Image: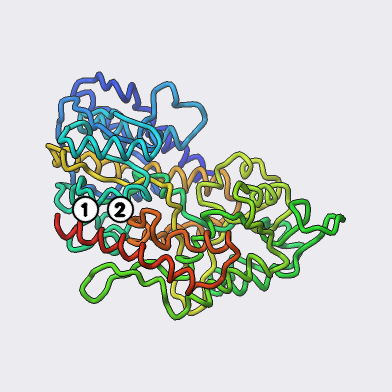
């Protein structure tokens, strides 16, 4: 109880200094004074631990200047005064983050354009290619941003002052997977909360798992023995017909699986990324590994030949049917995202549930891995930007403050204190987040390559990898090579 109270107090303290975020009417001295109020945390809280990590940005006064942002998901950055204190702790923490950065550097934030990702891409491309200085930062939809790189409209993040990919608020993949030839044009930080909360995982009904004597799943995970074969074997006989002799949504299953993007996550969970770098550091399509045929066949068998799995590939509008099965206790397992623990169905779920990482392919695989669906946001700076020092400092500050306060609110309060109901789930969740990766072959896929391979193959009922690869590879190779050449010429 003391921990819960201390964490809640931390959030209250974070938002207590808030006034109007977008108007920012205070003078500089008042701003610094307000910012300095956010100092005290309980020492046993993650807020205190992360507050000790310096961002190295120093102090600056930008005289009320606006950071102009094109935002695919405005609520990641734009929180209005009237939206706060409505019981949404995550939204309140974003408001407090904005206020802290605004106060510290005497800035404000303007979302200058919103719309569908295709409309945004057209606007951004036309604006930059016309030489117009209309915005400073693009928080676009990552899958669509990759296709824009060949237009040479983004700056290299390594050339932007104050940006430090070694800091914990930047994903490691920024430097390991998404950097080529000393350049990174599309980056992902904890400012991108759709990425933070979008990591794929598994949920399971602990009551039902106990009744079917599935054992201690947390111990299985922590011992490194949570594998796809183990999961498939565990649920293969868990099926109960509802009396109509037809396999449908009214029956009871071990696993409810949607025909959707979650299927693609198995590729990364099984440590088989689309792209890796060759000896010269050049990204190459390497999805065709020694184990890829086995992976495809195993996923196919799981979907089509495992009696304990509900899966309907022919329903393009299946949506969250499998999730609904879980909520009405007609499935023990379902796939989801970390942020999914905060939705209304999970908040109102009567049974005890737990969170698990996606299984490894074999026990020999060193780590549990996961990925994020392609609709999360990422960051890019237009080449028309006239003051990268300003943009770099504020983006770094927003990213750092997100890691220090917004992400802990999601994990430590929303998930670990309010929604997840056991201490083991908390440790497992940290394992999931640590295993999140971003692949050059997905960020720059532009819907031409293999990022959606498992989803598409299972929808077609196809387990012939070679035939799929033969048809798909020319487009995928052209996309990656074109992207690499464009980056080389920058």
Residue 218 sits in which quadrant? bottom right
Query: Is label 2 in a helix, a strand or a loop?
Result: loop
User: How far from the left and from the top, in percent, is residue 56?
Assistant: 19, 47
In what element is the residue under mark 1? loop
Q: Is residue 217 above or below residue 12?
A: below
Labels 2 & 1 near each other (Cβ < 8 A): yes
The quarter of the image holding the C terminus is bottom left
Residue that mark 2 sits on: 170
Task: Give me the residue at 20% from left, 38% from top.
Answer: 128
Figure label count:
2
Q: Which residue is drawn at 15% across and 25% down?
A: 63
Q: Which of marks 2 and 1 is nearer the N terminus?
A: 1
Q: Picture coordinates of residue 120 (x, y %)? A: 33, 37
* Neighbours of disc 2 within 10 Å: few (<14), some (14-19), many (20+): many
Residue 91 as seen in the image, left or right of residue 1: left
Q: Nearer the viewer, residue 418 or 255?
A: 255
The answer to whether residue 478 is seen in the rendering is yes
Choose top left, top right, bottom left or bottom right for residue 356.
bottom right
Mark 1 lies on residue: 164
Camera-nearest residue between 434 and 254: 254
Q: Please, which residue is most extreme toward the top here?
A: 25
């Amino acid at each position: 109880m003391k921990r819960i109270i201390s964490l809640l107090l931390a959030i209250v303290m974070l938002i207590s200094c808030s006034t109007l975020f977008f108007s920012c009417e205070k003078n500089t001295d008042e701003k610094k004074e307000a910012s300095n109020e956010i100092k005290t945390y309980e020492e046993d809280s993650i807020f205190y631990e992360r507050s000790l990590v310096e961002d190295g940005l120093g102090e600056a006064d930008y005289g009320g200047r606006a950071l102009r942002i094109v935002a695919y998901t405005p609520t990641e950055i734009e929180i209005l005064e009237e939206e706060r204190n409505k019981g949404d702790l995550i939204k309140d923490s974003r408001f407090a983050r904005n206020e802290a950065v605004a106060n510290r550097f005497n800035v404000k934030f303007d979302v200058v354009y919103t719309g569908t990702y295709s409309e945004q891409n057209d606007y951004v491309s036309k604006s930059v290619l016309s030489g117009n200085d209309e915005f400073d930062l693009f928080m676009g939809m990552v899958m669509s941003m990759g296709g824009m790189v060949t237009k040479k409209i983004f700056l290299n993040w390594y050339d932007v002052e104050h940006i430090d990919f070694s800091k914990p608020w930047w994903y490691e993949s920024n430097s390991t997977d998404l950097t080529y030839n000393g350049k990174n044009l599309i980056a992902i930080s904890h400012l991108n909360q759709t990425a933070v909360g979008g990591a794929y995982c598994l949920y399971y009904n602990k009551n039902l798992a106990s009744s079917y004597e599935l054992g201690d799943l947390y111990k299985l995970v922590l011992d490194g023995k949570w594998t796809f074969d183990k999961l498939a074997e565990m649920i293969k006989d868990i099926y109960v017909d509802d009396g109509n002799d037809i396999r449908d949504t009214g029956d009871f299953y071990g696993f409810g699986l949607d025909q959707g993007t979650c299927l693609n996550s198995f590729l990364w969970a099984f440590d088989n990324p689309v792209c890796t770098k060759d000896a010269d550091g050049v990204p190459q399509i390497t999805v065709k590994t020694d184990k890829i045929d086995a992976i495809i066949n195993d996923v196919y068998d799981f979907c089509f030949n495992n009696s304990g799995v509900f899966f309907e590939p022919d329903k393009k509008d299946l949506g969250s049917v499998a999730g609904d099965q879980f909520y009405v206790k007609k499935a023990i397992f379902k796939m989801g995202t970390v942020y999914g623990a905060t939705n209304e169905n999970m908040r109102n779920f009567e049974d005890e549930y737990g969170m698990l990482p996606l299984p490894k392919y074999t026990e020999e695989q060193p780590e549990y891995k996961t990925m994020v669906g392609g609709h999360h946001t990422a960051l890019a700076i237009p080449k028309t930007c006239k003051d990268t020092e300003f943009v770099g400092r504020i983006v770094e500050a927003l990213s750092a403050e997100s890691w220090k306060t917004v992400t802990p609110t999601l994990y430590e309060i929303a998930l670990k204190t309010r929604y997840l109901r056991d201490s083991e789930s908390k440790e497992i969740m940290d394992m999931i987040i640590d295993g999140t990766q971003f692949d050059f072959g997905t960020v720059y896929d532009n819907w031409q390559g293999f990022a959606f391979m498992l989803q598409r193959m299972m929808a077609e009922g196809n387990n012939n990898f070679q035939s799929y690869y033969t048809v798909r590879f020319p487009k995928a190779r052209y996309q990656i090579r074109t992207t690499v050449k464009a980056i080389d010429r920058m």
